[in-house]
Image (tube, rainbow, N blue to C red):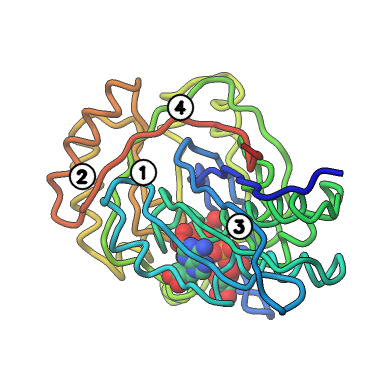
Amino acid sequence: MTTTTAVTVRVPAKVNLQLAVGPAREDGYHDLVNVFHAVALFDEVTVTGARTRATGGPAELTAEDASGGALAAHVARVPLDSTNLAWRAAELLAHEAGARQPVRLHVRKAIPVAGGMAGGSADAAAALVACDAFWGTGLDRGRLLELAARLGSDVAFPLVGGTAVGTGRGEVLAPARCATRLHWAFALSEGGLSTPGVFGAYDRLRPDAPRPRADPALMAALEAGDAAGVGAALSNDLQPAAVSLRPVLAESLEAGRAAGALGAFVSGSGPTCAFLAESAEHAERVAAAVRTASDCTHAVTAYGDVPGAVIR
Ligand SMILES: C[C@](O)(CO)[C@H](O)COP(=O)(O)OP(=O)(O)OC[C@H]1O[C@@H](n2ccc(N)nc2=O)[C@H](O)[C@@H]1O
Ligand SMILES: Nc1ncnc2c1ncn2[C@@H]1O[C@H](COP(=O)(O)OP(=O)(O)OP(=O)(O)O)[C@@H](O)[C@H]1O
């Protein structure tokens, strides 16, 4: 019998091609139409065995900057205890599947922290897949998706990847076809924005929010592989709220537009700004242009869509 000594899972960031937000529900969440798109900016989660007397779940978590120093300040904000979403994912799986060998989790981060690209959620999805393989629990996809939804609204999507329409609070996923490769530039900021804080600002700005609906123009452009059509249809209801909390984001958005981006918008709850480009080369030019904006500490390029969490 062979014993697994380490499992590494690679998991992508997301950008929201449409984020339509309804009024606040009684449970504090908002109904969404959330068009998720996975991009080639990857965190990695590695699970190894821990030598400890404790049973089941994680015993230790470490985090590392995978970007060569650019995300050092981000990684310093990653919690290394049981509040880390990857730790919570491993704990939940251990609880659901029975006590298992304690594990050590190592997270290599290339996704900005509190940046609106679902970095913590991606790590949680990766930890579910990695621990499932490490412990040999063999949960089926449906069960993993169910555990993911319990951890957070954004956790199910990175299990699946590609492009998908999320409804409910974002966790009910229907796959969508993106018939062309999309090229992106992202402007990262140093301080994050709190997701509940941005939803709260949205409630104050839009007390009369209508029921969210999928945008047929966006879905048709994705299906047709029409990048310019996608660019024209990109929308984020949370953008005015994010910009109200961080007005300097307007400068980054304007820099991207001036560089000819097909679309310029705040990613999810922000503060990362996303720019759709015509090609990989154009994405590099847009990234260079947005680096000059005062709020942008780092700009990266990536393409989408890409698959969800995979064992390496
Ligand atoms: C903004 C997005 O990133 C877009 O993909 C997501 O909607 C946020 O997903 P997330 O970070 O996984 O959020 P959760 O951990 O589920 O919830 C954090 C908080 O965000 C707010 N929240 C989140 C999702 C949702 N549909 N309505 C909400 O109002 C709530 O205040 C909630 O307490
Ligand atoms: N594995 C993790 N990586 C990063 N942050 C984490 C992690 N686990 C918990 N956190 C905490 O969660 C907060 C939000 O981090 P995260 O990077 O997931 O934000 P986000 O990308 O804006 O999320 P979303 O787009 O899903 O709203 C961080 O400020 C941090 O305190």
Q: CA distance from mark 1 to mark 2?
A: 12 Å
Categorize mark 1 by other alpha carbons within 10 Å: few (<14), some (14-19), many (20+).
many
71 over 57 or under it: above or below: above
Categorize mark 4 by other alpha carbons within 10 Å: few (<14), some (14-19), many (20+).
many
Relative to residue 208, is residue 49 drawn left or right? Answer: right
Q: Earlier in the sequence, mark 2 or mark 4?
A: 4
Categorize mark 3 by other alpha carbons within 10 Å: few (<14), some (14-19), many (20+).
many
Asked if the residue at label 3 sits under 8 Å from ligand 1, the reply is: yes
In the rendered image, the quadrant that contains the C terminus is top right
Q: Earlier in the sequence, mark 1 or mark 4?
A: 4
Residue labelled with disc 1: 274
| 2 vs 4, front mark | 4
Residue labelled with disc 3: 154
Residue labelled with disc 4: 182
Residue labelled with disc 2: 254
Regarding mark 3 in the picture, which secondary structure is present there? loop
Asked if the residue at label 1 sits under 8 Å from ligand 2, the reply is: no
Q: CA distance from mark 1 to mark 3?
A: 18 Å
Q: Are marks 1 and 4 in contact (CB under 8 Å)?
A: no
222 over 298 or under it: above or below: above
Check disc 3 and give the amino acid type: Asp
| 3 vs 2, front mark | 3
Q: Quarter-wise, where is residue 77 in the image?
A: bottom left
Check disc 2 and give the amino acid type: Glu
